[in-house]
Image: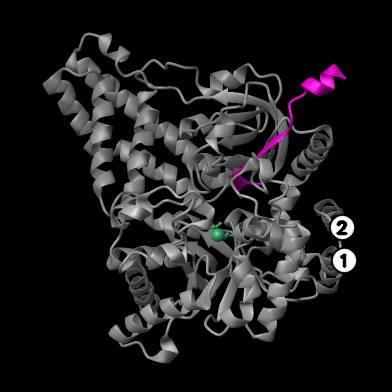
Amino acid sequence: MDNEASKPEPVTVKGIAVSPGIALGPALLYRSPVLDVDSAQQAPANPAAERERLHAALDRGVIELQALADRVSRDVGQSESDIFTAQALMLADPTIAERADTLIEQTGATAAEALSRAAEEQANILAQLSDPLWRERAVDVQDAARAALAHLTPLQQPTLARALSTVVEPVVVVADDLTPSDTAQMSLDNVCAIALAQGAFTSHAAIIARALHIPAVVGLDPRYMKAIQNGDPLLVDGVRGMVTIHPDEASSDNARTSAERYRRDLRTTQLRRAALTEKHGSTRDGHRIQLLANVGSVADARAASEAGAEGIGLLRTEFLLSEGTALFDEQQQADLYTKVILASGPTQGPIVVRTIDAGGDKPLPALLPSLSQSRQMAEANPALGVRGIRFQAGIAGLLATQLRAIVLTAERTNADVRVMLPMVSTVDEIRAAHQVLASVHADANIAPDRSVPVGVMIETPAAVLTLDLLAQAAVFFSIGTNDLTQYIMAADRLNPQLAALCSPVQPAVLRAISAIRTTAQAAQRHVAVCGEMAGDPLLALLLVGLGIEALSMAPVNIPAVKEALAIRTLAELQAIAERALHLATVGEIEQCLGELAQ
Ligand code: PEP
Ligand code: MG
């Protein structure tokens, strides 16, 4: 009894799913080793010897990065592998080596100190450039330099390899972030999952996790990460993007079964899914479902193309524009959108550009100076505050600049570019955006038949209840189930204590989705879903059963959703959805959906 009482309560933390699979294992807390450049300085500086050490370390770093690139190319794909090839080239490039040589000669620096300073200078130069692609390279220069520095400096903490060499069973690596050299040490034999506070779909750790088929969730709230102790049992769900600390017995048993099945089926699953890459999304009886990608960077767009996406259903532009302190001008924005479109491959599908969805939990530092003093003050209730389209309306020229860039991109690329407005709750908001777009079209001499179509995200209860009215001003809808769920359930999507309440399979949410579909159909408006729900194979099946025609998701989820659709008929999915709509609880609905998993 006492034991039961002292057993910690399960806590579920939501993050970003970057590598699919489910795993259960003890936590291994890890911090990337700090390269102790200062203590390497004790060696008396003999310039010739230091230069020799420098070049030997650079050579070894280049070889290691190239080996990593080869492995990633074999196991994941060419574009991911290119990151490491580029890093190897940076290290082999004479720019850094020559500058480090000079520092050794002129200042008596050690090889480590000179390399560290030369790399930092180079990274600073790149970080100042306006093109975000070059700015991303700044991080790569530092990563690349670490590969060589590791051969010149003592490490202050054990490397991941050393930490892993002592484990007796596969662990869940819990860290802030992991460097390429950390991740190169992992395998499924010693790491069953990864849980990180930093990172994104395209971060190095995410790429390697996918390469090694290690389930991974990143972007986890550091407040909850801090509570994790070494050895704590963790359940990592790399499909839903959730980590449960101290999971209960029932979830642990389920996770063990799923993890075993996942490992057993991995190879055959990959081969089966690869065969579907070129095919369109469709049910077994040929009912077409458009499978689109949610994208926040050029690298995501590449991943979308490789995963067989039929277009981009959500381009999150606040991610594209949120680096640095200066907002991109029209030309820079258009260049970026063009790069995303080119990277997304030869798709003929839509490219849905969502206008900046800032405010609330997505602050955009670049826009801070443009905000009036009252708006710079913290909001008591940010989720209900000035965010999405409300935010855009308050900054002169913000929407106009973005719409000009989008129109310019549409003209330039001839792609099926569309505009989508976030967090809409009234028809007036859409009409105001139309006015701005009309003057952009007029200034650019765009004829009405070439105007960029405008749609809206359905994320607020107000939008659901007035969908017939919104249809007068918007030609397509995309349901943002992440926000729609939090607003319908009045449950903060970022609060892990409310994770069960903030579920997209709550009866209220399913009824809202069904109502949206019915009203949209009557108004002859196309409806997609672009919240996380669309990327979960079982929930995607439910959405199709509810009549949704397009699903937009993280590229990593496309193959599994495509496969789940391909083995079911539309009638089966409609029957399940009909039953789910009449069930009273999340538990009952999940049980009903479980039939689809068999
Ligand atoms: C959503 O709310 O479902 C959505 C896709 O938008 P975001 O997650 O960017 O708020
Ligand atoms: Mg949203």
- Residue 282 in percent (x, y) is at 72, 71
Residue 563 in sight from this viewpoint:
no
- SS assignment at label 1: helix
Q: Residues within 10 Å of mark 2 (few under 14, many from 20)?
A: some
Judge whether 192 appears above or below 363 on screen.
above
Residue 489 in sight from this viewpoint:
yes
Judge whether 371 appears above or below 10 on screen.
below
- What residue is shown at x 42% (from left), y 62% (from top)? 391
Which badge, 1 or 2, is on the more N-terminal residue? 1
How many badges with numbers are in the image?
A: 2
Mark 1 to mark 2 CA distance (whole Å): 8 Å
Residue bearing mark 2: 592
**Numbered circle sitting on residue 191:** none
Along the line of sight, the residue nearer the viewer: 475 or 156: 475
- Residue 290 in percent (x, y) is at 64, 71
Residue bearing mark 1: 579
- SS assignment at label 2: helix
68 to the left or right of 106: right
Instruction: Confirm whether the magenta stretch covers residue 8.
Output: yes
- Residue 50 in percent (x, y) is at 24, 18
327 to the left or right of 465: left
Along the line of sight, the residue nearer the viewer: 144 or 387: 387
The three-letter code of the residue at mark 1 reads Arg
- What residue is shown at x 27% (from left), y 33% (from top)? 120
Quadrant in the picture for residue 400 = bottom left
In the rendered structure, which segment of residues is drawn in magenta?
1-20
Asked if ligand 1 lies within 8 A of label 2, the reply is: no
Quarter of the rendering occupied by the N terminus: top right
